[in-house]
C-alpha cells in the first residue's frame, strides 16, 4: 500500500533495486550516484525510525498525563492565581507567604468589574498564613456567588507597602481540555494545569 508511511522504506528499496536490475550494460550507474542514493536511503530509514520512536513517546506521555490528571480529581491543590471563587457560603482559601518582620498583611477583594468589595487586615505571626474571605462586602452584606479577584500586600520593617507571594488552595472538581491544553476546575474557578504548584494528599 503506497500511501502508508510504514511502507516508504520498502518501496524506496524496491525502486532502487529495480533501477540496478534494469540499468543498461552500455551505460551503467555512475558509482558516485549509486553511493549518493544509498546514503539517501540510509538517512531516510534513520529518520523513519526516529519518527516512529517519537510517536511511541508521545503516546506514552499522553497516557501518563491522562492518568495523572484523573488522579487530581478531589485532590487539594495549591495554585498560582489572582482570582478566587465564592460559592455562596465560603470562598477559595488564600495561602500567603511573607518575610520575617512583616508588620501587617492586607487582603483586597474585587468583583468582576474590579470594583472594591472588601479590605481585610491581619497581623500573622507565622508564614505561610491562610486567609479565607467570608463572602461579605465592607458593609457586611453577602455577595453573589461567582468569580472575584484579589491582591495581597504587606507592610515591611521600613513601613513600605510590598506585594506578597500568594497561592490559592482548593479541591479539583473537574478537568477540561481545550485547544490541546488541559485545565482544572476548583469549584467554578478554571485554571490552566501549569498554574498548579503542588498537590496535597
Image: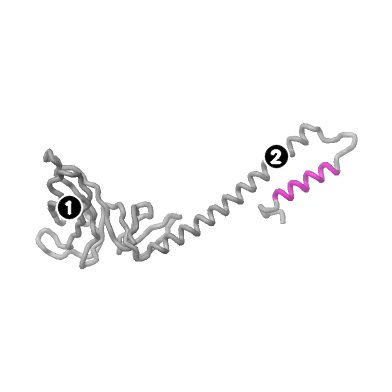
Quick one: label 1 or label 2, which is nearer the N terminus? 2
Q: Position of residue 152 (x, y in %)?
A: 20, 49
Reply above or below: 125 against 93: above
Reply above or below: 156 against 179: above
Identify the residue under disc 1: 108
Magenta part of the chain: 8-21
Q: In terms of image quadrants, where is residue 135?
A: bottom left
Which quadrant is home to the N terminus? bottom right
Determine the main secondary structure of the stretch shown in magenta. Answer: helix
Which residue extends farthest bottom?
89
Left or right: 52 as drawn, with respect to 79 = right
**Any magenta on residue 184?**
no
Q: Position of residue 176 (x, y in %)?
A: 40, 61
Which residue appears at 90% of the width and 37% of the height? 25
Which residue appears at 21% of the width and 56% of the height? 130
Counting labels gives 2
**Any magenta on residue 14?**
yes
Identify the residue under disc 2: 40
Which residue appears at 11% of the width and 40% of the height? 159
Q: Position of residue 126 (x, y in %)?
A: 18, 51
Left or right: 188 as drawn, with respect to 180 = left
How far apart in space, not on screen, are marks 1 and 2 (Cα)? 65 Å
Reply above or below: 174 against 20: below
Which residue extends farthest right?
26
SS of the residue under disc 1: strand
Left or right: 70 as drawn, with respect to 12 = left
Which residue appears at 12% of the width and 38% of the height? 158
Amino acid at each position: 500500500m503506497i500511501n502508508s508511511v510504514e511502507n516508504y522504506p520498502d518501496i524506496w528499496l524496491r525502486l532502487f533495486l529495480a533501477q540496478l536490475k534494469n540499468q543498461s550494460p552500455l551505460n551503467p550507474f555512475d558509482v558516485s550516484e549509486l553511493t549518493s542514493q544509498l546514503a539517501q536511503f540510509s538517512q531516510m530509514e534513520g529518520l523513519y525510525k526516529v519518527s516512529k520512536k517519537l510517536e511511541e513517546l508521545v503516546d506514552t506521555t499522553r497516557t501518563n498525563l491522562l492518568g495523572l490528571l484523573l488522579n487530581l480529581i478531589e485532590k487539594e491543590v495549591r495554585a498560582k492565581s489572582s482570582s478566587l471563587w465564592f460559592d455562596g457560603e465560603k470562598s477559595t482559601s488564600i495561602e500567603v507567604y511573607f518575610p520575617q518582620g512583616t508588620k501587617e498583611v492586607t487582603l483586597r477583594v474585587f468583583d468582576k468589574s474590579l470594583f472594591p468589595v472588601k479590605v481585610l487586615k491581619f497581623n500573622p505571626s507565622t508564614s505561610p498564613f491562610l486567609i479565607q474571605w467570608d463572602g461579605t462586602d465592607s458593609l457586611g452584606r453577602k455577595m453573589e456567588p461567582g468569580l472575584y479577584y484579589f491582591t495581597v500586600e504587606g507592610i515591611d520593617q521600613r513601613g513600605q507597602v510590598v506585594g506578597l507571594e500568594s497561592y490559592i488552595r482548593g479541591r479539583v472538581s473537574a478537568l477540561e481540555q481545550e485547544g490541546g491544553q488541559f485545565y482544572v476546575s476548583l469549584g467554578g474557578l478554571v485554571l490552566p494545569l501549569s498554574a498548579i504548584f503542588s498537590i496535597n494528599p
